[in-house]
Amino acid sequence: MDILSKRMRDLRVDHDMKQSDIGSALGITQNMVSNYENGREPPIATIIAYANYFDVSVEYLLGISADRQRPK
């Protein structure tokens, strides 16, 4: 599992959400969420949507930064 997939999964689990919950919130299917959490590369729009939904930086999701905070 790459860092993006792991962080996407960890954020969902940390917020006690099911794959179907985050899928509904972002307008994607539960199957797509599962695919992304298992290594399939999501489109950049989905990465941005995850970052916005969970209020983390894209850099955090991509493993560029260990800091979850979005720049101010």
Image: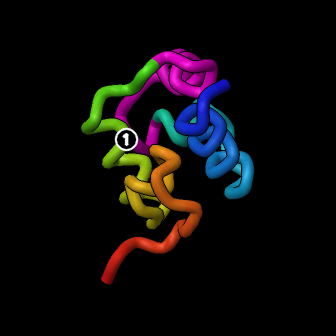
> Please, is residue 13 above or below residue 34 in the view?
below
Rendered-image quadrant of the C terminus:
bottom left
Rendered-image quadrant of the N terminus:
top right
> On the image, which quarter does residue 52 sit in?
bottom left
Q: Is residue 36 magenta?
A: yes
In x, y percent, where is residue 46? 34, 37
For this view, does 40 lie left or right of residue 5?
Answer: left
For this orientation, the residue located farthest to the front is 64
**Label 1 belongs to which residue?**
47
> On the image, which quarter does residue 31 sit in?
top right
User: Residue at the spot x=58%, y=62% of the render?
Assistant: 66
Q: Is residue 38 magenta?
A: yes
In x, y percent, where is residue 26? 39, 41
Q: Secondary structure at mark 1?
A: helix
> Please, is residue 53 above or below residue 50 in the view?
below
In x, y percent, where is residue 54? 49, 60
For this view, does 10 lie left or right of residue 64?
Answer: right
> On the image, which quarter does residue 25 sit in?
top left
What span is colored magenta in the figure?
24-40
The foreground one among 6 and 31 is 6
Which amino acid, by three-letter code, is at mark 1?
Ile
In x, y percent, where is residue 32? 48, 19
User: Residue at the spot x=62%, y=19% of the render?
Assistant: 38
